[in-house]
Amino acid sequence: MGVEEDLEDLHALAESTDAAVDSQDLASAVDGVTRQPTLPILPPAIPPPAVPSVAPVPAVPPVLRPLAPLPIRPPVFRPPAPKKEQAGSSSGSDSDDDDSGRAGAVPGSIVEYEITEESRLVRERHEKAMQDLMMKRRGASLAVPTNDKAVRVRLRRLGEPMTLFGEREMERRDRLRMLMAKFDAEGQLEKLMKDHEDEEAAASAAPEDVEEEMLQYPFYTERSKALLDARIDIAKFSIARAALRLERARRRRDCPDEDVDAEIDRELKRQRACPCIAVRLVMIDHCQAALPPTMESCLPHGAQIGVCYGMLGSNLPSRPDVVALYNQRNIRRMRLYGPDQHALQALRGTNIELMLGLPNEDLQRIASSQANANTWVQNNVKNYRNVRFRYIAVGNEVQPSSQNAQFLVPAMRNIQTAISNAGLGAQIKVSTAVDTIILGESSPPSKGTLKSDHRPLLDPIIQFLVNNKSPLLVNIYPYFSYANNPRERLDYALFTANSVVVQDGPLGYRNLFDAILDAVYSALEKAGGGSLEVVVSESGWPSAGGKATSIDNARIYNSNLIQHVKQGTPKKPGKPIETYIFAMFDEDQKTPKLEKHWGLFFPNKQPKYPINFN
């Protein structure tokens, strides 16, 4: 007999008697019942559906595995609650449903199930996450001050620390927001509103005091002006070093086969020897010194000397040999008078900066069509991406009386447009080369003016250069001024005068080169070109063929020129002068005889005289 039948007998026995059975008798009665284990209830067997007869299939004996017994958790019994009178009048259907739905449960008892520790922890985490979410939603609906000073004041009023270690402004404001949400949830909203009203009243009562306090909030320590100036000068110096490193990286990227370390190391050594480095160290130690008026003399492109590469000579070395000679002699700039493809090919991947000429005979063709200019730039510039182009010299010494004069400025404009369209406008400057015949008056230098008959040609050139921030290329030859003027002194032309030769107001001139160059600057100022820079695109001294021509005089002039251009002129002191010496080799195919002997080297690449380009 099962436990269910025993319980039904007990209920029948209780209903047949009017006397109530107390809890002790019921317990003894339950203990007297023989308990038997509950058998598992198995679902009724369902017969398989009828299957039409098919070909017999070999029967595979089923593998019968014993089923694991279901875990039996004994229910927890509680004494039944006292029955009410109306409980016995309940419908039989309800009792039947209740009994059938609670198989094995004792009537009047409550079945409880145990909760595992993992379930309890999950429920607690869920409840905490919900509380945090509700707190954030509540905090988002509150108005929190955005001013850091007001946030600090509010925290102080709430009895909280004004700031925590390492806490930033936004973190402090978020902390205040969560505190306000907590107090609001606890029903302290009125207190918060009162604090807010007090804050508004205090702010409206003395706004100037609050603003003054805010302005006095320290965020840096002010130091002396000497230290500030020192840091500015150090930054300028560091920028120059950074530019060298960037240049090295770019050239290694564009030309992996090029070795630029030697050049960069030489430049860094030269900068270390520059006086401004010592000044920089003094500023760091004492913060009382200042750099020289300009630091351009310490920059890599200040006064490097270039050499013009003419090709009108017999038995000249090959283009690669000439480029190798430039590198061997540390000549960092070259001027070519035309787009010689073999020379451009030899310059690929080198660190030699190039001034490329557009010959006078090509001016009309380039000026007549923008397409022609685009083709010229494509064939001679863009096709040589790893050549370091610096200038395009459109024409050389074009005179107003020449038939090419009318094409000069249009050709310059077309080349400039082609360069800009190629994305090279910031790297390559377009200009033209003129000679000192343009000067109508040159002595003293401050009275320098342009010839009136040259102004129709020169004025558009000056305007073009000013608009494009390009320099004017000027061929300056003190030799011709000395040779054509019997009153000029030789030492004044060779940079060897021991005292001032020409006094021009407060400026004194000891050499003819400075006098001519400053006369050009004065003439440009009077013609609206005061902002222009001047690049000396040719200068030199012949070694034979004319008055005072000798190897010794050529050596003196060119050697002194290399050293002098680092210093600037009396009109522009301390500003290095970019200069190109004429020429690399003698050109025996030129006429007259004087034009054949301007070279620094013989065709066998040996120097005519000792000369140092460093």
Image: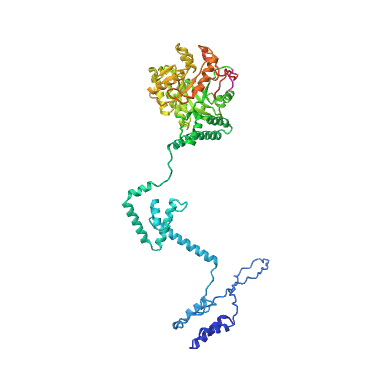
Closer to the camera, 158 or 524?
158
- Residue 195, placed above or below residue 483: below
Q: Tell me: residue 513, above or below residue 286.
A: above
Magenta span: 315-319
Q: Position of residue 58 (x, y in %)?
A: 68, 66
- Residue 211: tell me if it is visible: yes
> Residue at 53% of width from left, 35% of height from top?
245
Front residue of 78 and 171: 171
Q: Position of residue 4 (x, y in %)?
A: 55, 80
- Image quarter of the C terminus: top right
Q: Main secondary structure of the magenta part?
A: loop
Q: Does residue 138 appear in the picture of this structure?
A: no
Depth check: give the residue in front, 360 or 218: 218
Is residue 61 shown left or right of residue 261?
A: right
- Residue 287 x %, y %: 46, 36
Figure quadrant of the N terminus:
bottom right
The residue located at (40%, 53%) in the rendering is: 152
- The image quadrant that residue 174 belongs to is bottom left
In this picture, is 154 found above or below 572? below
In magenta segment, residue 263: no
